[in-house]
Each structure stands twice: as C-alpha cells, then as structure tokens.
Image (spheres, grey):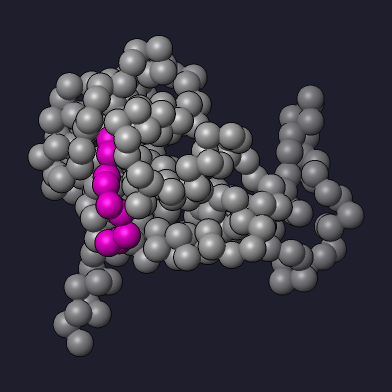
Amino acid sequence: MKIAIIPARGGSKRIPRKNIKDFCGKPMIAWSIEVAVNAKCFDRIIVSTDDAEIAEVSLRYGAEVPFIRDTSISGDYTPVYDVVKDVILRLDDGGSLFDKICCLYATAPLLHERYITEGLEMLGSPKCSYTFGIVRFDYPIQRALKKNQFGNIQMFMPENFLSRSQDLESAYHDSGQFYWASKSEWLTQPFTFNEQSKGVNIPAEYVQDIDTPEDWAVAEYKFNLLKMKTTSSEAY
C-alpha cells in the first residue's frame, strides 16, 4: 500500500491561511490533493493538519483527515519529518498496512503527476532511500558573487572567472514539492541530501517556492502559462 501525506498547518505567517487561500480558482491545498489523485498510485491521501477549516476543505476535495494534528508538532519550527512520522505511527496503531510513503507539500500547485510517479519508480532502484524533485539552477553556481564587509563584490570561486558557462557542471536544488521513501526509512532516519537519494528532474516552469505574496503572483503567472500551453497542445 502506498500513501500520500500532505502536511498543512493553519499558522502560516507571511501569507495568512496560505494552505486554503484561493489559487487560480481552488484552495491551494486542493491542487496538491488533485495531483495525488491523478497520479493514480496512492491507496490513501491523508492530510495532517491542526486546523478545522483546512480539514474541512481537504475532505471536500477528496483527501482523508483521520485525526487532527497535535499542537506540539504544529509550530513554525516543527520539521516536516516529525509530522510524517506522527502520521505513520498513528496509522500503524490502527493496523494499516503500507510500505511506501510520499510526503507531498500543500503548496505545490504547478506539480505534474508524472513526476510523482517517476519518483516512485526511481525509489525501486539500487541503493536508493529517498527520491524527490530537483530543479537545475539557470546560472552556474560556480560563478556566484557575494558582497564583502565593505559592500564590494567578490566571487565565491574566483578560479572560474574565465570559465565558459557551458563548461561548468550543472547544479540543482530541491524543488520543495514531494519526497518518497519507504515506511522504515521515514521511521529510522530523517530525509537528507546524500548518496542514498535520487532526484527527479523537473523543469523550472513546474516549480515555484511560495513564501511571499510576490512568490504567489509568480506562481499564478506560471500556472496560467502552463494552462495555456496545455490547452494549445490539446487543440492540435
């Protein structure tokens, strides 16, 4: 059995009520529930929340909310790992049988289901404990700049000043959308970026951190571009 766990607390500060704020016609969390449903690989889709309104919206869009999360693991600094582990232990108490778990963020409205299923398939490869989405930096990090104490510019790696961009190794960052692992992995070791992890390549147009109102506006812009692109391709 495979389950999706969507953490969604009610105390967002920078964008109040972010998880259920309207995003392009639906509450934000509805898009994550929908992509989990469309992936067709989950036996259960569970939302972990401390908030009654988020619970109601989640149920309305097809997720389960088998319990309300305790306030002790609903703070600003609570690791997502602790939330996932809490759900696993509670479900185990009820005798549920499941072996693979995907932690899916509530703020992933651009994510396509094919990347979720690709992560699941990748999880079965040798020496792989976790899989998650990654995005390539659009500029070589080897040519990154910083300001010194006087405000003057310096390179982090000045030895790459004369290097051509195309000659430098590509670098990636976490897409911040989903994380696959077995139940035993979630219970025994927190997620980390190491040689036991594999990344699913996701184009930048499908990814956007949403931490500020400006991020939200960019995400809506990307969403509408993707919608236009999909509509245009279906026309042919």
Q: Position of residue 169 (x, y in %)?
A: 74, 64
Quick one: quadrant of the C terminus?
A: bottom left
What are the residue bounds of the magenta stretch? 39-47
> With 25 as the anchor, is 164 left or right in this view?
right
**In the current view of this chain or complex, which residue is farthest to the front?**
95
Nearer to the camera, 202 or 78: 78
Q: Residue at x 27, y 52 (%)?
A: 43
181 or 172: nearer the viewer: 181
**Total tally of numbered discs in the picture:** 0
Q: x and y percent of residue 133 in the render?
A: 50, 55
Residue 50 picture location, percent across and down:
28, 20
Residue found at x 27% / y 62% = 40
Q: Is residue 189 above or below residue 72?
A: below
155 left or right of 69 in image: right
Quick one: which residue is furthest to the bottom in this view? Answer: 236
Pick the front one: 190 or 132 = 190
- Could you say which quadrant of the image residue 66 lies in? top left
> What residue do we see at 38% from left, 46% from top?
98
Name, please, the residue furthest toward the top.
72
Q: Is residue 97 above or below residue 15?
A: below
- On screen, residue 187 above or below 68: below
Is residue 145 visible to us here?
A: yes
| Residue 42, position as x, y percentages in the image | 30, 54
212 in relation to 16, above or below: below
User: Is 46 colored magenta in this rendering?
Assistant: yes
Question: At x 43% / y 48%, what residue is drawn?
Answer: 99
Which residue ends up furthest to the right in the rendered image?
A: 159
Tell me the quarter of the picture where residue 12 sits: top left
In magenta segment, residue 107: no
Can residue 175 be seen here?
A: no
